[in-house]
Image: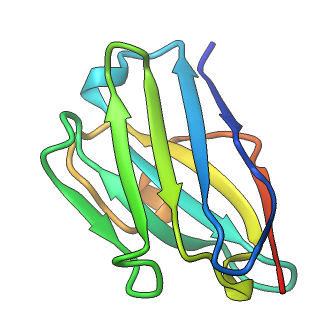
Amino acid sequence: QVQLVESGGGTVQTGGSLRLSCVVSGLSFGSYAMGWFRQSPGKEREFVAAINWNGGSTNYAVSVKGRFTISRDNAKNTVYLRMNSLISSDTAVYYCAARSLAVVTTSSASYAYWGQGTQVTVSS
């Protein structure tokens, strides 16, 4: 059974930082590209960041580039999202996702497995 479990969400003030974690089990983690997506109330789920199988290639949404960093530890079956300089528009439920092909992609339809999400709230 494949499981993706996110953690690290919470409430932070504008300009603050958070690090999200996603622990994956039930699949060969090192063979999967991983992505982070987010969804705010009334909006569609949107791409945030993605990383290939070995961390050698990453991709970011324009809105988070320079502020967020995606990384992975294949020994721990974990993908991370470091979020700095948070702003109110970053408020959302953040989801991690796994893609069976190892290359990065921004399309949510390309990801087969999803976590349950973790809430991030940025307050002013």
Is 73 rendered above or below residue 49? above
Question: Could you tell me residue 99's position as x and y percent?
Answer: 39, 42
Question: Could you tell me residue 117's position as x and y percent?
Answer: 75, 48
**Residue drawn at point x = 41 percent, y = 55 percent:** 110
Question: Could you tell me residue 14's position as x and y percent?
Answer: 72, 80
**Residue drawn at point x = 50 percent, y = 62 percent:** 108
Judge from the rendering whether residue 117 lies leftward or rightward of residue 3; answer left or right: right
The colour scheme used here is rainbow
Please identify the quarter of the rendering in which residue 122 is found: bottom right
**Residue drawn at point x = 68 percent, y = 58 percent:** 94
Judge from the rendering whether residue 24 lies leftward or rightward of residue 28; answer left or right: right
Which quadrant would the N terminus be assigned to in this image?
Answer: top right
**Tally of numbered discs:** 0
72 and 83: which one is in front?
A: 83
Is 77 rendered above or below residue 82? above
Please identify the quarter of the rendering in which residue 76 is found: top left
Which quadrant would the C terminus be assigned to in this image?
Answer: bottom right
Judge from the rendering whether residue 86 lies leftward or rightward of residue 42; answer left or right: left
